[in-house]
Amino acid sequence: MSSYVLQAHQFFADKVSVLKERVRNLKQSLSPDEFLQNEIVKFAARVRKATLETIPEDPNRQEYLLTGELKKFRRYKQGLQRYRIIFCFSNKPSIILYLYLNDTKHLRKDGSKNDPYAEFRNLVNKGKFSHDPQDSRMRAWIDQYRY
């Protein structure tokens, strides 16, 4: 069981909400066997497992590290093919904040302007996301979970 409080930025929550809606629609329109074999359903299950189980086991794993401008953030990619989950975390207080999940318009392709890392970097540069603990939005998030 994770000792981290798990939170989702609205951007991430909106992407997951769209994914959940797609899964609900598939459940209504497909047979049980087709539903279980559907790639969207499998993808949703992998995202759920990653965010609720795998990442909280150790959010500071070496394979999650990003470099360059994004080195303060972490990413999860195992089993997600061209999709990425980007998050940040704190050990004091113990919080993981899921920030970003790319969509079909921003699939991983090195060098593409639509690459998820390029989109995320652009959003960071526009102030949508921050890793700075002095940022007022990050301060509010951290202060909310002080013990």
Image: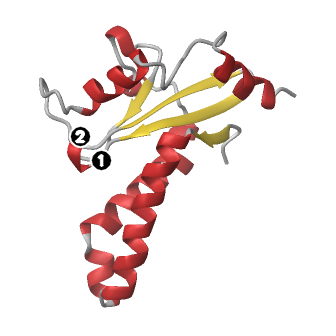
Along the line of sight, the residue nearer the viewer: 53 or 35: 35
Along the line of sight, the residue nearer the viewer: 48 or 112: 112
| Residue 71 in picture, x, y percent from top left | 41, 13
Label at residue 128: none
The figure's colour scheme reads secondary structure
Name which residue type carries label 1.
Answer: Asp
Label 2 belongs to which residue? 106
Residue sticking out furthest to the front: 126
Residue sticking out furthest to the bottom: 31
Residue 26 as seen in the image, left or right of residue 143: left
Which element type, helix, strand or loop, lies under badge 2? helix
Name which residue type carries label 2.
Answer: His
Along the line of sight, the residue nearer the viewer: 76 or 146: 146
Q: Is residue 68 above or below residue 16?
A: above
Q: Is residue 139 above or below residue 80?
A: above
Q: Is residue 83 above or below residue 145?
A: below
Label 1 belongs to which residue? 103
Residue 95 as seen in the image, left or right of residue 112: right
Q: Is residue 97 above or below residue 51?
A: above
| Residue 54 in picture, x, y percent from top left | 49, 44
| Residue 111 in picture, x, y percent from top left | 12, 23
- The residue at the point 53 percent across, 19 percent down is 130
Which element type, helix, strand or loop, lies under badge 1? loop
- The residue at the point 54 percent across, 32 percent down is 58
Label 1 Cα neighbours within 10 Å, binned few <14 / some 14-19 / many ≥20: some
Q: Tell me whether circle 2 and circle 1 mark residues in contact (CB < 8 Å).
A: yes
| Quarter of the figure that contains the C terminus | top right
